[in-house]
Image: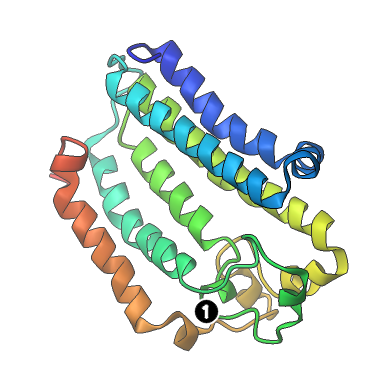
Amino acid sequence: MTGSLDALFAAVVAFVGGHFLLGWPSVRAALIEQLGAMRFRAVFSLASIVAMVWMVMAYGAAPYMAVWEPPLWTRWIPNLVMPFACILLVTGYNPFSPTAMVREEDFDDPHLVHGILTVTRHPVMWGIGLWALAHLTVRGDAASMMLFGGIAVLAFVGMIKIDAKKRAEYGAKWAPFELSTSVVPFRAALDGRTAVDWKGIGWLRLGGGLLLWAVLHGAHPWIAGVSAVPV
């Protein structure tokens, strides 16, 4: 199930497509009715982990096939983008996120929109998407284009799917939150629909994001086998 580009393609389709299939409203509703919410979440999580492990193993075993040769200047792109991606990941996992599993009564909280949610309501998805796109610019082989391209599709299309799912699930409860936040970072603030909550984001979380970037940058030769230094 590994060792070829076909195997990697199948793994990427399983990982990305599995998320979209299990998250499809009719499929999700049917499975929850049959399994119950808790069992559905367990099945979803297990399937995602299995598909991700398969995808990573298939990527590691895939043969190298050059598609294009990225210019040397593209090596700066991950170094400029990844600090922001790491900040979004760290700050996104800290505050309560209405885009995750929530209760309907949670939307009655007048302080629901706070912290990084005043920048974007999908900080973690943005962090993952930026990571994928940044690495896509410096990897010109077929395997990397499949892996990072698939993850980018999952992240950016996933934002739209999450919004549609929550809109259908919570209706009027979701509307005020959606109107006071935005998918595109800082869009709601620029439109005057919210104010960026820098205090709620906090210097500690910003520093944690930069620390994560520094660790990943320093450990890149051991993680990916190549240095992240753009020289």
Residue at figure coordinates x 37%, y 45% from the top left: 134
- The single residue placed furthest to the right in the displayed view is 172
Rendered image quadrant of residue 89 = bottom left
* Residue nearest the viewer, comparing 5 with 78: 5
Task: Please provide percent x and percent y for residue 191.
Answer: 68, 75
Up the image or down, 1 lies above or below 58; here it is: above
Residue at figure coordinates x 16%, y 35% from the top left: 225
Residue 227 visible at all: no
Image quadrant containing the N terminus: top left
Name the residue that disc number 1 marks: 115
Residue 34 visible at all: yes
Residue at figure coordinates x 32%, y 17% from the top left: 62
Left or right? Give the position of 138 relative to 201.
Answer: left
Task: Please provide percent x and percent y for residue 228.
Answer: 19, 46
Left or right? Give the position of 46 relative to 84.
Answer: right
Rendered image quadrant of residue 72 = top left
Residue at figure coordinates x 55%, y 25% from the top left: 13
Look at the numbered disc 1 and give the secondary structure of its residue: helix
Residue type indicated by callout 1: Gly
